[in-house]
Image (spheres, rainbow, N blue to C red):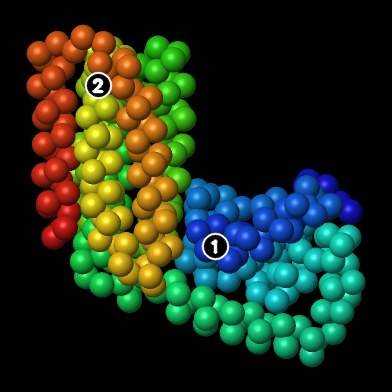
Amino acid sequence: MGSVEDGCTVYYDGACPLCSREIAHYQARAGADSIRWVDVARADAGALGADLERDAALARLHVRDADGRLVSGAAAFAAIWRRLPAYAWLARLASPPPVQWLLEGGYRGFLAVRRLWRPAPSALPAAVLADLRTDHAGETGAVEIYRGILAVTRDPALRAFATRHLATERSHLAQIEVWLAPVHRSRLLFLWRPAGWLTGALPALCGPRAVYATIHAVETFVDRHYAGQVARLDGQPNLAPLRDLLEGCRRDEVAHRDEAAPSAAAAPGAVLRTWARVVGAGSAAAVRVCRRL
Ligand SMILES: [Fe+2]
Ligand SMILES: [Fe+2]
């Protein structure tokens, strides 16, 4: 078996429960540490390489070998099996072209079935698309809030807080982008980005307590926002994977809110209370606009 340095990389859709379960099974086998595993739903675009688009990587399993050559589908499974001693027999069995063709046919059948319970983004109802547009704009703003904080503050505890939260918000954004094609995203992202950045940077100029109060206000709003959406999805079994994604995001936001709460509650002044109300009202207004634009 080779080492990770050999450069074999697997690109899989971690937002798909079936795919991630299968990959988790392989990751637990001997030899898995010689493979670099990239969850396409959560990775930055740079992690995929110039020749692999996120949409293509989400549509089919891809493997890049040590020479940089990309294979997908049945050939990608065979490439994984070759690296895992427990599956070497299957890799040998799968190597003749006719077997590869059969496997590829089976894999395409699986992808067709997967589409039935995970609707293509374009097939989502308009109301769900409108909700997702607000989520996408909100998570874009959330990423910028923490970037704004990190651009200003030198406080080590606040930098650690913002760095951790930034990673979570980036993951939320990447997962929502899987569901919301660019054509359905807010046309006002050029406004939401600077608005988010200033929502982090301005309080950071005033000190950590102002930042924690801001995060507490934002996440209090976002918790309610996601809870309403999750409730609306509860009766739609075909959208259960989306419901679970949003519920996971909501739980993260609640953890963010609760982490900020002790510092935010430490005797807030009238100015901070007013600022927190402005942030909450601004978030609600942005959501109303995003439903349409
Ligand atoms: Fe988030
Ligand atoms: Fe958050």
| Residue 239 visible somewhere in the drawing | yes
Q: Position of residue 140 (x, y in %)?
A: 31, 45
Which residue in the protein does label 2 denote? 213
Looking at the figure, which quarter contains the N terminus? bottom right
Q: Position of residue 117 (x, y in %)?
A: 45, 74
Q: Position of residue 245 (x, y in %)?
A: 41, 54
Counting other residues with Cα less than 10 Å from the Cα at mark 1, is it few (<14), some (14-19), or many (20 or more)? few
Residue that appears at 83% across and 52% down: 31
Q: Is residue 147 above or below residue 103?
A: above
Tell me the SS state at disc 1: helix
Q: Position of residue 210 (x, y in %)?
A: 24, 17
Which numbered circle lies on residue 17? Answer: 1
Q: Nearer the viewer, residue 7 or 255?
A: 255
Which numbered circle lies on residue 129? Answer: none
Q: Residue furthest front?
A: 235
**Label 1 near ligand 1 (CB < 8 Å):** no
Residue that appears at 45% across and 13% down: 156
Q: Nearer the viewer, residue 183 or 83?
A: 83
Q: Is residue 241 above or below residue 268?
A: below
Residue that appears at 33% across and 69% down: 236
For the residue marked with disc 1, what is the amino acid? Answer: Pro
For the residue marked with disc 2, what is the amino acid? Answer: Ala
